[in-house]
Image: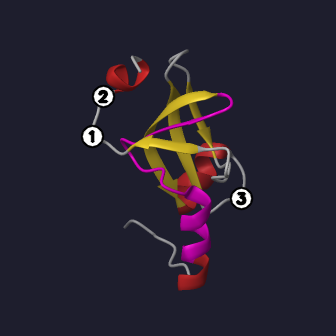
């Protein structure tokens, strides 16, 4: 049986705000590079992935280095959405 945690709607809204527009297939950039979002994890799966207490985590691929990273850094004004899942990583990297 799969257990899921039900969050109150205000908590869910806070979590969604922290994740920002990152969803599987999205591309975004910040001062450290350009990233493809591979997946968004929530609940126990997120906590296990980052080995700490959190409600969420994202798995990303750095396009310049092809490095995978799992983190729970909040979306800030220094992050910029390039596109949702309409283009391939190679098309974004070629820009």
Which residue bears the numbered disc 2?
88
Instruction: Looking at the image, tell me whether mark 3 or mark 2 is earlier in sequence order.
Output: 3
Earlier in the chain: of badge 1 and badge 3, it is 3
Q: Which residue is mark 1?
A: 86
Q: Which residue is mark 3?
A: 53
For the residues marked 1 and 3, what is the alpha-carbon distance in whole angstroms? 33 Å
Secondary-structure class at tag 2 = loop
Residue 74's x, y, as percent?
66, 53
Q: Give the quarter of the figure containing the N terminus.
A: bottom left
Q: Would you call the spot at circle 1 few (<14 residues within 10 Å), some (14-19), or many (20 or more)?
A: few
Q: Residue at x 63, y 52 (%)?
A: 75
Indicate yes or no whether the magenta region holds residue 38: no
Q: Position of residue 41 (x, y in %)?
A: 49, 53
Dot 1: element = loop
Q: Is residue 34 left or right of residue 84?
A: right
Please tell me the numbered disc located at residue 66: none
Give, as a single range, the part of the protein colored magenta: 12-32
Nearer the camera: disc 3 or disc 2 = 2
- For the residues labelled 1 and 3, say whether their Cβ atoms are less than 8 Å apart: no
Q: Residue at x 33, y 23 (%)?
A: 91
């Amino acid at each position: 049986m799969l257990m899921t945690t039900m969050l109150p709607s205000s908590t869910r809204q806070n979590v969604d705000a922290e994740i920002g527009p990152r969803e599987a297939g999205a591309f975004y950039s910040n001062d450290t590079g350009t990233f493809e979002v591979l997946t968004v994890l929530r609940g126990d799966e997120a906590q296990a992935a980052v080995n700490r207490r959190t409600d969420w985590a994202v798995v990303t691929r750095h396009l310049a280095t092809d490095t995978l990273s799992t983190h729970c850094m909040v979306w800030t004004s220094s992050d910029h959405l390039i596109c949702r899942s309409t283009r391939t990583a190679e098309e974004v990297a070629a820009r």
